[in-house]
Image (tube, grey):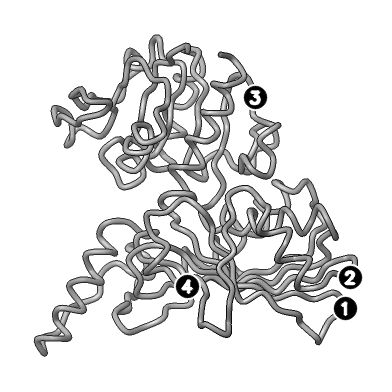
Amino acid sequence: MKEWNIAVVGATGAVGQELLQLLEQRAFPAGTVKLLASPSSVGRRISVFGSEWMVEAISAEAFKGIDIAFFCAGGSISREWMETAVHAGALCIDNTSAFRMEEAVPLIVPEVNGDRIPEHGIVSNPNCSTILMALALKPLDDAFGLRRVVVSTYQAVSGAGARAMQELEDQVRSYVTGESAEAKVLPAADDPKHYPIAFNAIPQIDSFGEDGYTKEEWKMVRETRKIFENPALAITATTVRLPIFRSHCESLNIELRQPATVQQCCALLQQAPGVEVMDDPSQQVYPMPLYTSHRDPVFVGRIRKDPTVAHGINLWLVGDQIRKGAALNALQIAEIWSNRRS
């Protein structure tokens, strides 16, 4: 099998680290591995495929001879270096929002629209919450069509980075010992106000627009329309941060264009790639983040009729947003690309 030279930009971050583990676990055919990161991480050694690779600074030279470049750092890094990597000949898989809504850049969830992966250039990973939702919507859209989607998310603090995770841990410890812990990170570090996340729910992820919706909410709307090639899809979102370390949860209220029974929806979801149905209310079986973290599928449960609208279905899903919501989705894109060319 042909081997590919790869670069991971942001190799020391949460998504970069997850990607490196998955490269090994899924035996991706990698040759040279370039680990690229900020100056503060240069010189660190990380074991990948049984060999130690030194973290290097991001530079034009670093992309020479690279076949696939995974961008797992911030959007500003992607905007600064993506063109350089493309010109060097790499397929660039971007985990940031930098290029998602550019018309010429495909927005890919492999199980939904993997046929749109290009031979070269830039491919964008959708927002993590969008990826999880798209897997559940795909089989229902194919069979019955989507008329309207109302989604409410309950998102883990890891989606806001390592500092948010540490703040949750510190606040819980302070609560137990009777001490106070200042909130400095959430809802967003650059906001004028910060709120504790321990034992709390914060109905704000990213900044607000003049319409009262956050950027995160509009990402889910616009990205879903692009992925499903349905710019008229009626979809609205509310995104909430909960004191969970890992795995996002979503409540979906779906209005289909054609009638569908709960049994039909369950059967379709059971057959859908990347989805695992976990739904037995009589035994209190349903997805929960504590039991779905570090696992590949999106878990779906609480599938039931919505009797208040025609052809309405409610469901609940949980998925590891660092894994399928970021690193795994990016690697699956690379796997499809690799298999086409091998």
* Above or below for 119 versus 94: above
Contact between labelled residues 1 and 3, with CB atoms less than 8 Å apart? no
Contact between labelled residues 4 and 3, with CB atoms less than 8 Å apart? no
Which is in the foreground here, disc 3 or disc 1? 1
- The image's mark for residue 204 is 4
Label 1 crowd bin: few (<14), some (14–19), many (20+), radius 10 Å: some
Please, what secondary structure does the residue beneath circle 3 have? loop
Q: Amino acid at mark 3?
A: Pro
Q: Earlier in the sequence, mark 4 or mark 2?
A: 4
For the question of whether residue 337 can be seen, the reply is yes
- The image's mark for residue 135 is none
Residue placed under numbered mark 3 in the picture: 118
Contact between labelled residues 2 and 1, with CB atoms less than 8 Å apart? yes
Q: 330 left or right of 201?
A: right
Q: Earlier in the sequence, mark 4 or mark 1?
A: 4
Q: CA distance from mark 4 to mark 1?
A: 31 Å
Label 4 crowd bin: few (<14), some (14–19), many (20+), radius 10 Å: some
Residue 292 placement (x, y as % from top left): 42, 62
Residue placed under numbered mark 1 in the picture: 310
Residue placed under numbered mark 2 in the picture: 259
Q: Amino acid at mark 2?
A: Pro
